[in-house]
Each structure stands twice: as C-alpha cells, then as structure tokens.
Amino acid sequence: MGFKLIPTIISVSLTLIIWFLIPIPQDVSANAWLLFAMFIGVISAIIGKAMPIGAISIIAIALVAITRVTADNPSDAIKDALSGFANPLIWLIGISIMISKGLQKTGLGARLGYYFIAVWGKRTIGIGYSLALSELILAPVTPSNTARGGGIIHPIVRSIATSFDSDPEKGTEGKIGKYLALVNYHSNPITSAMFITATAPNPLVVELIAKATNSQIHLSWTTWALAMVLPGVVALAFMPIALYFMYPPEIKKTPNAAQFAKDRLQEMGPITLHEMIMLAVFGILLLLWAGIPAMLLGDMWTLDPTTTAFIGLSLLLLTGVLTWDDVLTQKSAWDTVTWFAALVMMATFLNKLGLIAWFSGVLQTSIGQLGLTWVPASMLLLFAYMYAHYIFASTTAHITAMFSAFYIAGIALGAPPMFFALIMAAASSIMMTLTHYATGTSPIIYGSGYTTLGEWWKAGFAMSIINIAIFIVLGGLWWKMLGYW
C-alpha cells in the first residue's frame, strides 16, 4: 500500500463526518463546507503522516478538481485546483532551496561555521555564539530550516562534541554536547522568524496576511527583515546564556575547540573559486532582496523577490557552481513547490468561499463575550495559536489550519493589523521550539541523543516564553518606532 492504514482511515472518516453528519452552519455555502471537510481531512493526513505531504497534496488537487467546489465548469475547476503553482512566493522558496544546495556542495556553509569557532571557540559559550551567528548568516538564503540546522550546523556540533569525548553512548553528553545541541536547535526557530526566506512556511504567512487584509498588508522581504532584526538579534543573543544556566556544560573552557576548527579549515584548504562565486551570489541576493539598487538608482531597478531568486539560481548554473542535475536532485525543493501550491490553493478558496470569515466570526464572538480589551484578547488568541503546536508535527499544516482565522479574529477584536500580523508571523516560527517533533530540524538534533525528552521539552517551553516575550515587548516598541502600527 502507498499509504498508512490507520492515519488514512482517520483522515477519511473526519472528512465524511464533517460533510455528512455535521449540519452546514448558517451563512456557509455547501461548497465551502465540502472544501472545509476535505481540508480537515488533508491536514489530518499530514499530521498523521498517512502519506508523504507531496503525495497528499496531489490527491488534494485532484479532489478539488473532481468535486468542483470552486467552479461548476470542469476546465475552470482544474484551473482553480492548479492555481497555486502560479503563486510567485511558492517559487521563491522552491528556488531558494535549490540555491542553498550550493552552500552544502561548495562547503561554504561549514567553512563559515568553522571560521567563527576558530575566533570565538576558546570557551563553550563562545562556541554557542559561533553556532548562533552561523545560523543567522545562513538563514536569508537557506529556506529549509532543516537543511540549515540539521544538515549544515549539526554535523559541526557533533564533530566538536566528539573531539571533547562528549558522547551519549558513553554517558558523557553533559560535558559539552548537550549544551551545543540545544543551542544548535534553538538558534533555528529564531533565525527562521527573521527572514521570509529563512523557512519554507513564511511565504504562506505572507500570503495569508495579504488575503486576510485584502492586500492592504503585503509584507515585503525588506519589511519583514527590518521588523524582525532587532527582536531576533536580541533573542539570539539571550538564548545561549539562558541555555547555559539551564543546562550548564561540564566543560566551560575549550581552548582546543579553536584549534580543532583551525585544523578543519586547514583540511578544507584555501577558499575555492566556487565558494567565492557562492559568496558573491549570496551578497547579490541580499542586496536585491533588501532593495538596495532601487534605493540608489530608482524604481526601474526594483525586482520582485522571486525574480531575484531566479537570478541567483541562473548565476550558479551559468558559473557551474550548480548543475541542472544538482537542481533535479533537490527533492525537497520540488516537494515544497507541490505541497505549497496545494495548501495555498485550498486556503485561498476557503477564504473566497467565506469559510474563514465565518470561523473568525465564531472566534471573535466567543472571545468578545469575555469583555476583554484588544490587548488581552489578542494575546489570548496568540498564545492559543502558538501552543496548539503541541498537537502538530508540521508548521505548514498548523499555519494553514489556524493562522487566517486567528489573525482575522484578532483584528476584529481591535488588534492593530500590522502589529498582530508581525507577532503572529514571529509566533509561527517560535512555536518550533516546543517539541522534538515540531519541525524537521528537531528529530535530527534530538535523535542524536544529547538530551532526554524531558530536558528537550523543558528547554523548549522556557525558550518559547522568553522568545515570544522579547518579540511582543521589544518587537512591539521597535515596530512602533518604525511606524508600522
């Protein structure tokens, strides 16, 4: 069988129960309710891992076209079902994942990490900051937070821990490995919150905010980065210290780590031509995404972020840093394009058919009856949204299922639209701290065995409180200064 039986039965049953047994609410059309039933089934299948998410998405596209919930005409129905593939934000992430392959192929990502450790690696906490800084530098052009934290940074962590004989199999993980593994992981959600291109679901957040506000708020790459840079950097600076006190490493001074990193750099040899090209393309992407040419030379130099991503990939292909075979083997990129297209399509038509507005109204009414002002009301929605991630194993599924309704309800209760958009966007990454299944990075690092389950969940909950507090208070003040709300 191409599917897991129990999760599939559950997802199909949920769809049928919603469609056949639950009465269609007043003010909700039959097509909207059927699409909602299929949507819940799809989200359930993703959570239960009934099939790979890309395969589930193909089935979702087929179901939308077959049932004609978006259009009576069969040709219009399939056009609607495939409409997500025309969304530029989806291709921004897909192409950026392809570009990030260059960091791994050339070795530039690892080289940057070892450089920082060579400079600041004389103390354990210095290594922690080196890892966090490496994450921050790689984040803008590595949309797969799993590839960044699990594929680039984590092997460096394991190498350093092993060099100090910190090995879970020997019972010596407390020497240094536990602390470094936790810093490795908790850098990941913070940097993911800082750039649209730092994790795959961020463009989905942008899209949902735009649809919820009728495009009155459409976060650009620069707006997002500028908004998140101050609270993000502060959270990133505070995190290694907080974890240092929670789980102090037995080895505090690490003079050998700096030499270890220097030895690794020596093994890698001098920087190669392909690494230099990768670094140059990295710089070009950042300049164009930040809109620097347009600021200096005028609007004619303005480029869409997705166009910029295509330029970066084109340059890597032209220079031979990446080959077309490299691009074809990036399964995660093509997979992301597929499932994003399906989920964005379903979320878009749930909105167009009025289901999201109805559900937001239910939330608004329920919280409105408590008689709260917008501040506690919106915070109640924010925390309910963020900590619901304990029952999700996919940030994409969580965001698709809950973001729009909670965001619209918050605005209706009086929250400033831009403030609530930014704090909900930050929470959509911060919630990755919570569990060992919260995002693709977590099972990689947790699976290395450096922490117990209890230690992981305790650190995750503590960091979620610290991070969201920094983004609410410092972020809120910063966004006020920027005139965003």
Image: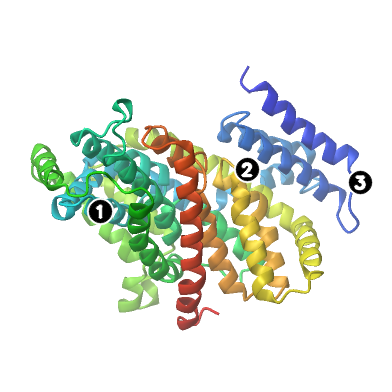
Tell me which residue sits at (82%, 47%) in the image: 33
Q: Is mark 3 on a helix, strand or loop?
A: loop
User: What is the three-letter code of the residue carrying label 2?
Assistant: Ile
**For the residue carrying disc 1, how many other residues have a C-alpha within 10 Å: few (<14), some (14-19), or many (20+)?**
many
Q: What element carries label 2?
A: helix
3D distance between C-alphas at marks 1 and 2: 33 Å
Mark 1 vs 2, N-terminal side: 1
Tell me which residue sits at (36%, 36%) in the image: 450
Q: Is mark 1 on a helix, strand or loop?
A: helix
Q: Which of 485 and 353 is in front in this view?
A: 485
Mark 1 vs 3, N-terminal side: 3
**Relative image position of residue 312 (x, y in whole percent):** 32, 53
Question: Could you say which disc has been placed on residue 391 in the image?
Answer: 2
User: What is the three-letter code of the residue carrying label 3?
Assistant: Pro
> What residue sits right under mark 3 in the picture?
23
Q: Picture quarter containing residue 45?
A: top right
**Disc 2 or disc 3, which is closer to the eye?**
2
Tell me which residue sits at (17%, 49%) in the image: 253
3D distance between C-alphas at marks 2 and 3: 26 Å
Residue 127 visible in the displayed image: yes
Question: Could you say which disc has been placed on residue 287 in the image?
Answer: none
> What residue sits right under mark 1 in the picture?
125
**In the depicted structure, whether residue 15 falls above or below residue 2:** below
3D distance between C-alphas at marks 1 and 3: 58 Å
User: What is the three-letter code of the residue carrying label 1?
Assistant: Ile
Q: In this view, does 318 lie to the left or right of 227?
A: left
Tell me which residue sits at (54%, 59%) in the image: 427
Q: Which colour scheme is used?
A: rainbow
